Image (cartoon, rainbow, N blue to C red):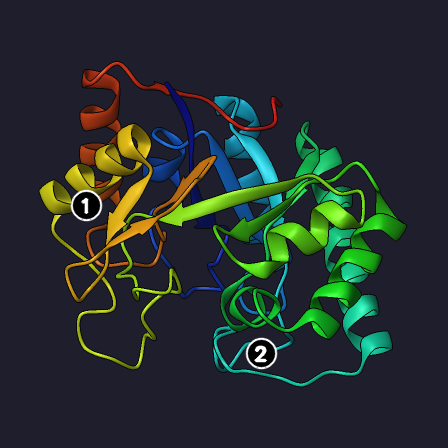
Amino acid sequence: MRIDLNSDLGEHFGSWRMGDDEAMLGIVTSANVACGFHAGDPRSILETLRSAAARGVTVGAHVAYPDLVGFGRREMNLADAELEADVMYQIGALQALARVAGTEVRYVKPHGALYNTIAHDERQAAAVIRAMRAVDPELPLVCLAASRLVEQAEAAGMRAVPEAFADRAYEPSGALVSRREPGSVLHDPAEVADRMLRLVRDGVVVARDGSEVAVRAESICVHGDSEGAVQMAAALCERLTGAGVTLSAFVER
């Protein structure tokens, strides 16, 4: 058994710090690095990329809506041309910084509201796919497992990487429970580790109503900004490797 473990990193802004990138980079196999639209300033992004390169962690572009104030978690209905240009701009900026840091951008994972919107909004999803293909048609797209986006990306000739979330609660439909609702974010390291081992072994996650949801995932995310993120990631890593699961990036660096 093999699985990728990823986290959203590079989200510092000036003197304001978000999460512990150094600790997370010692655990995860892939790093979704902010591109400046929802978080991250050029200097902190470059520092994160250099740390990822030094540790051999694969890097992806964590593209988002232009929403620094809302941390990219507010829905936006952007025109196709605007969304395409925004995505191209973010990937290109990260590619330049990654080159300086001695690494390269190997995939794209949208952030927050953009991630959730394109899981069901085919128009905005198509704009993101077009932007990615224009920049580099070989870049895989990390998608919410069991969403329509997986089939849409594959139909466009793109590799779709289905993803599960260690620290988020699930609806019976396979969607994530909205962050506006209590219990949407999980914090218990042991619970998180047990849930994800079940996912890797059996391909299921228990939804908030107690039902089992089929989830086929190639990568597991632990949000870098979650309370106790490092502890959860460490517990998850220990639980999976102890059960014989190999942690490795879905795209080799």
Q: Amino acid at mark 1?
A: Val
Image quarter in which the N terminus is found: top left
Return the x and y of residue 95 as percentages of the image width and height: 75, 43
**Left or right relative to 152: residue 186:** left
Nearer the observer, 7 or 19: 7
Instruction: From the image, tell me which residue sits under label 2.
Output: 67
Nearer the observer, 234 or 218: 218
Location of residue 204 (image quadrant): top left
Residue 252's disc number: none
Q: Is there any visible trace of residue 102 in the rendered image?
A: yes
Return the x and y of residue 185 as percentages of the image width and height: 24, 64
Q: Helix, strand or loop at disc 1?
A: helix
Q: Label 2 crowding class (10 Å Cα cut-off): few <14, some 14-19, many 20+?
A: some
Instruction: Look at the picture and state if 175 lies above or below 100.
Output: below
**Left or right relative to 247: residue 180:** left
**Left or right relative to 207: residue 105:** right
Disc 2 versus disc 1: distance between alpha carbons?
A: 29 Å
Return the x and y of residue 149 as percentages of the image width and height: 62, 58
Q: Amino acid at mark 2?
A: Asp
- Residue ID at (73%, 83%): 78
Q: Helix, strand or loop at disc 2?
A: loop
Instruction: Look at the picture and state if 118 lies above or below 191.
Output: below
Q: Is there any visible trace of residue 62 in the rendered image?
A: no
Nearer the observer, 130 or 7: 130
- Residue ID at (82%, 58%): 131
For the residues bearing labels 2 and 1, Cβ distance under 8 angstroms: no
Instruction: From the image, tell me which residue sits under label 1.
Output: 192
Nearer the observer, 215 or 144: 215
Image quarter in which the C terminus is found: top right
Residue that protrudes farthest toward the top in the picture: 244
- Residue ID at (71%, 51%): 153
Return the x and y of residue 170 as percentages of the image width and height: 29, 61
